Image: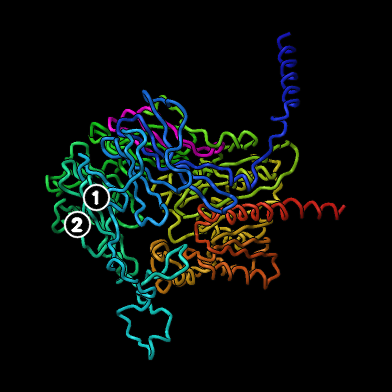
Amino acid sequence: MRQLMHRSIGFLVLLLLAAAPGLAQKRGFVATDYYKEIVPGDVALSPAGDLVAFTVSSVIEKDNRRHREIWMARIKGGLPDGAPFRFTDPTDDSYGPRWSPDGAILSFTSKRGKDPNDVWFVNVAQPGGEAHHIEGVDAQPIWSRDGKWIAYEKSPSTHDEGEARNPREGWIAPDAHSHTLDPKRFDGRVITAVHYKRDGTLDLLPDPSVHAKTQLFVVAASGGSPTQLTSVKFEVGDAAWSADGRTIFFTGDEHLDDNVIGREPDAAIYAISRDGGSPRKVSTMSGAHAQIAVSPDGTRLAFLRTPKQGEETDLMVADIAADGTFRGQPQNLTASWDDIPGAPMWSADGRAIRFAAGLHGNNHLYEATLQSKAVRAITSGDRHLTNFSASKDGATVAYIENDVMHPSEVFVARADGSGEQRLSSFNDRWLADIRLVPAERLTWKVSGGVNVEGWVMKPLDYSPGKKYPLILKIHGGPYGAYGTGWFDQFQMLASSGFFVLYTNPRGSTGYGHAFQWATRGKWGEVDKEDYLGGVDATLAKYPDIDPHRVGISGGSYGGFMTNWLTATVPDRWAAAVTARSITTWESWYGSSDAQGLTEHAFFGAPWEQRDLYRRLSPISYVEKVKAPTLILLGENDYRTPISDNEQWFMALKKRNVPVELVRYPRSGHNLSRTGEPWLLVDRLERIRSWFQYWLIDQPARTSTAQR
């Protein structure tokens, strides 16, 4: 009788679902849904923990642009107290909220009209306050703890006020030995520096000799004439006040502009008096130092240190004297923790340091105690948590959360991660009409018993017994990772009828130091096994996948791997989409803005490792490619320049392999993340439609013709 009742209730539920028009008409994710997505970020919790400010980014579709505003939410007893509300003028673009130490003032960045100063301040303690400037502050403020002083980092002007700037300044290197007969007839460039271009920037960079380096300034919080504290020949960064407000720490690499092949990173920690004087190098170890954080009592300095490229990054703590110099050798809090810590944040009592980190596809908040040096997770779950901000007493923490089924929203919780509450619901309305697809974790073993991890999304409206195509997605880096976060492209592909497999092969971050660097000198050779093993494991677990309709796609390093796998394992792939790709490492080295990537990974420059560079270049095997290939690139991409993509296009075209080359104007390497909205959505649809044609439409036509 009970079983019959359950069946009757279940049948009634099905009838009700079918009759409900709102539920019955839900659809899958499509490319244009990107225009609706709201992305919060820049979380800043007030010192008292009663207000949280954050940036809200949206897309203005008709104008092909993004818009940012500062929003605010009230918190009471660690819980949301009402809905978030817009804080800044919706007609202006505003971002980067920062609180004063007493929580009375909120600063933010906003370009308004013709005002040259885009740094604004609002008195939050008094209702109805207008945004205003503080005299002498025209860069993001860094308050001293007593709130009496503001420091900031900025490139000082090299021109007198009102002086017209030469638009061709720095076009001719001052150390050039060649000369022209008539300077008025030459409007080109003479380059002697290595760093003469930057990804996403169409114009070439001027010679470093005319570029004003970022320096450190200080001014009274009440306003006034700023004092330039530093005049160093390198970029100043990571500025942080001492507890007593008398000293400012910062980092810098004095050899940044050196044209040295394979130079190891060497950013040191410096200290300078608020009253001026010469900066003092206080770090006692070599390597790259970053992300300075002073303890609540001012007696310790936390920072991240990477001894050499490819070596582990660790969280370090140094005892410091009154003048900022180190007392003894810093201690390593993460020596026994095999992953990459994020920027340090001190606990209120100074006994522990917190940081964000990504492990096994998730991103969470971790804590390392000074006494035990043990690292433990504060938050948990299959999701991505970022942008952590804590109240002064450490009792409350706010952050951004997203997962496979949910875009980013703002959350708040207690210090131990308990009592978590969602503050915002910006994406709920448009998601109410959409059915999303969950991801299932999958693991498999490769050589040496190494476990490799990935995730599989089934097609929307999956029906057992029906055959479906599969798309393998490959992340960039290679030192990056996929995981349990929101990814609109994967939702779009799953909603279009594809199984989607995305993996973290050897070379990915979040699985330990040895795993990350296992591919050094063997890019494509080691991780190929991981990708193919993932495809085989997916085919074994999901027998409804058609092994003859497997596509492959990736961008940046993922584009390289797409080229590599279609060239070295040509019979596995029915179609490919390669974006921002590399085909020839020697030519990439000469035209990219990131030579250091292969200098370390390939044990030297091309002339030092000629055979290795050529052996690991997909172009060396291009004659084997069979997969119809779509090539996507940005015309301002200097990370993976146009020439490599054009080489791949020409080789496939000459060999009669179906190929299309799509060039996106005004677009750099980050087109897929921060590119113009119209172009970004076009890119999504081209990926979908290419796979739709070659993995679904074309096989169906072929099958019909054969019958």
Asked if one can make out residue 570 in the rendered structure from this viewpoint, the answer is yes
Q: How many circles with numbers are drawn on the protein?
A: 2
How packed mark 2 is, by other alpha carbons closer than 10 Å (few <14, some 14-19, many 20 or more), is: many
Please name the residue shown 62% across and 33% down the image. Answer: 432
**Outermost bottom residue:** 181
Q: SS class of the residue under badge 2?
A: loop
Q: CA distance from mark 1 to mark 2?
A: 10 Å
Vertical arrangement, residue 436 with respect to residue 619, above or below: above
Judge by depth and name the residue closer to the eye, 627 or 289. Answer: 289
Please name the residue shown 27% across and 34% down the image. Answer: 347
Q: Is residue 414 magenta?
A: yes
For the record, the magenta segment spans 388-415
Q: Is residue 313 magenta?
A: no
Judge by depth and name the residue closer to the eye, 600 or 404. Answer: 404
Residue 101 horizontal/vertical position (percent): 26, 38
In which quadrant is the N terminus drawn? top right
Residue 459 horizontal/vertical position (percent): 67, 41
Residue underneath mark 2: 229
Q: Which mark is residue 326?
A: none
Q: SS class of the residue under badge 1?
A: strand
**Identity of the amino acid at label 1?**
Ala
How packed mark 1 is, by other alpha carbons closer than 10 Å (few <14, some 14-19, many 20 or more), is: many
Q: Which mark is residue 151?
A: 1
Callouts 1 and 2 close, C-beta under 8 Å:
yes
